[in-house]
Image: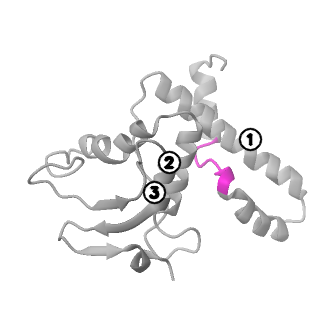
Amino acid sequence: MRSLSAPTLLSLALASCHHAVPSSASAVGDVWIRDVNVVSAERIRQIVRRAGDRGRITAAYFVARGGRLLFGSDTPSAPTYANPPGRNGYLEMVELERAGIPPRRIFDAATRANAQFFGLARDYGTIEPGKKASLLLLRADPLTSVTAFDTLEAVILPSGRVVPRADLAAH
């Protein structure tokens, strides 16, 4: 990977602030392509791929140089006409992993690091006596790959209520 100057990095970050997620772009792009007849379908796909590449390059550069990785998604909780809540977060984790960021680092960003950054580490962020947490029961190890979240079986809420996967499905 080439070395990037701070102004170049900033321009890449701004250009890809809401970078496209290539894994979902074709579904979104096909709808977009039908509605926009000015640009060819192939050109739109190239733009989406390039934006995703820039986002991954920026994320990898940032993390490799000690940047604090936090996790968040801009998907509203409801009503939404895009991806259901949680889906964009998952797609963002997949893209971070594709950028070469280890799943353990991504998992830390989504849990402990966020709680610490927002001053909530006393109550959230790790599994310890006295802390609040929703637990995800998975069939695969999320420290090996973020695709482990595809194996979700149930969620245990802080109240102790168990919510099976079937009850979480978007309707």
Local packing at callout 1 (Cα closer than 10 Å; few below 14, some 14-19, many 20+) is some
Q: In the picture shown, does residue 50 fall above or below 62?
A: below
Q: Which residue is mark 1?
A: 50
Left/right of residue 88 with respect to residue 66 in the rendered view: right
- Amino acid type of the residue tagged 1 in the rendering: Arg
For the N terminus, give its image quadrant.
top right
Residue 131 coordinates in the image, percent (x, y): 14, 54
Q: Please state which of residues 101 and 71 is positioned toward the viewer in this rendering.
A: 101
Q: Which residue is mark 2?
A: 93
Q: Which residue is mark 3?
A: 149
Residue 150 coordinates in the image, percent (x, y): 49, 60
Left/right of residue 91 with respect to residue 109 in the rendered view: right
Which residue is painted at 58% across and 74% down in the image?
81
Looking at marks 1 and 3 on the same chain, the residue that comes earlier in the sequence is marked by 1
Q: In the picture shown, does residue 82 fall above or below 90?
A: below
Where residue 154 sits, quadrant-wise, is: bottom left
> Is residue 74 visible to us here?
no
- Amino acid type of the residue tagged 2 in the rendering: Met
- Amino acid type of the residue tagged 3 in the rendering: Phe
Left/right of residue 48 with respect to residue 84 in the rendered view: right
Q: Which residues are magenta?
A: 16-23
Dominant SS type (magenta): loop
